[in-house]
Image (spheres, helix red, strand yellow):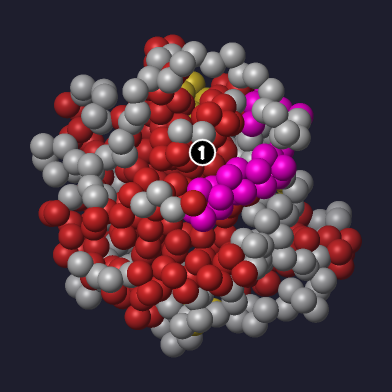
Amino acid sequence: MVNVESHLNRLLAYVQRRDYAGYDPYDALNSPFLEVLSARSKWLRIVFTQLLRRFPLNLRPVLLISKGHNPKGLGLFLEGYSRLYKVKQEPATLNRIKNLMRVLCENRSTGYSGFCWGYNFPWQSRTVYRPRYTPTIVNTSFIGHALLDAYESTGIDTALDMAVRTKGFILRDLNRKRDADTFCFSYTPFDHDYVHNANALGASLLFRIGELTGDARLKEISFASMGYCLAHQRDDGAWPYAETKIQSWVDSFHTGFVLESLRRFLPHHNSPDWRRQYERGVMYYAENFFLEDGTPKYYSDRTYPIDIHSPAEAVCFFSTEGEEYRCLTDKILLWMLKNMWGGNGTFYYRKNRFTRTKVVYMRWSLAWAFRALTTYHVACQKGVGDKNGHQFPELSSPARALAEPPLSGMRT
């Protein structure tokens, strides 16, 4: 067991002093200069974003990029606080949960069929330009799960109401790719990008809402969506990022997202096939993305660059997977604290073979490190496991049927 309290307390002090606002690796187009220069060119948007992301020094102040609240980062902080509050009901933690819920409501994307969230910057992929706050299934799912965590740990009905409202966005605004009796949700309402980990995250959120509210139809939809993801698992247990040739890579933390999502179904969906596929995926994850000393790899076939997401997601997943993986979890966590810790409450973004990128990113680095440390810290004190030692989030008893009333005091 690794004592993470000191790191956790210093990290909390750092982010609380800054009100959870900061820079992001992909916020280049928040620069008024770069936004104007690239206004008519997809490739300039991509180039500017990638150059700023990879540059070892922080040029954002020079480019007039302001620090901001990233909704996904706020959701990850909310998840961590909810986890801490569940084991130790401190009033200060409860106040932070309520404050993060308020800020998330203020920063949600409006004009859609349900509650949803994007990023606080525009971004360009190879196929689609997404303006600021374009909602994604990934952001909405992480935040939706965090809200359900907040509800289960605090009993605040508003958290449940906000989470349940995400189903309207997922069900009515996203596109779908069908395959027999399964389907895959699109990444945003404006594209036909079908990404396996994103679809799995959305499916797991719908399933969890269905469990909490007693909505059997919602659970059926979630089975069909998760079934699509399972149908695309490779024979070796891996999942490609997506189906297109250019997106066929397999990486560590997106593998973790799929497995976390699938794990939510297993205690309640009695399918030996799903269990076998899960166990094959866990084995692939554990055997292909870590060196003997716990060094996490981004891709299975090479070590560098090492992104903070890789150890953070691995600690999140394996620390709640049971005693079988305790040694691996501790090795990864110790490596992360030794190699990615900034010493002043921060974590580094990336480590290359000979250098580190030390720009502080609130969402990408600090929020993910906070999620990892809180998950590990709580798992060491109080675990919830099945007879095989696998750890699962607790599910409260089904909540009342929701008519989705207006949220008092919340912006619509």
Most extreme residue toward the bottom is 354
Q: Magenta: predominant secondary structure element?
A: helix
Give percent across and percent down for residue 323. 14, 54
Magenta stretch? Answer: 92-115
Which quadrant of the structure image shows residue 46? bottom right
Q: Is residue 22 visible?
A: yes
Q: Which residue is mark 1?
A: 147
| Quadrant in the rendering for residue 341 | bottom left
Residue 123 shows up from this direction: no
In the rendered view, would you say 59 is above or below 387?
A: below
Instruction: Tell me which residue sits at (37%, 46%) in the image.
Output: 86
**Front residue (pair 357, 102):** 102
Q: How many marks?
A: 1
| Quadrant in the picture for the N terminus | bottom left
> Horizontal and vertical percent for residue 176?
55, 25
As helix, strand or loop, the secondary structure at mark 1 comes to helix
Please indicate whether residue 53 sits to the left or right of residue 266 in the image: right
**38 displayed left or right of 310:** right
Q: In percent of the image, x 51 and y 48: which residue is there?
A: 94
Image coordinates of residue 153 in percent, x first then y, are 41, 40
Single out the residue that lies furthest toward the front.
Answer: 91
Residue 113 covered by magenta stretch: yes
From the viewer's perspective, is 280 left or right of 89? left
Give the answer, above or below, for where 85 lies relative to 275: below
Mark 1 residue type: Leu
Residue at 14% across, 44% down: 389
**Label 1 environment density (alpha carbons within 10 Å; few <14, some 14–19, many ≥20):** many
In which image quadrant can residue 336 be found? bottom left
Q: Residue at the spot x=62%, y=49% of the render? A: 99
Between 314 and 86, which is closer to the camera in this rendering? 86
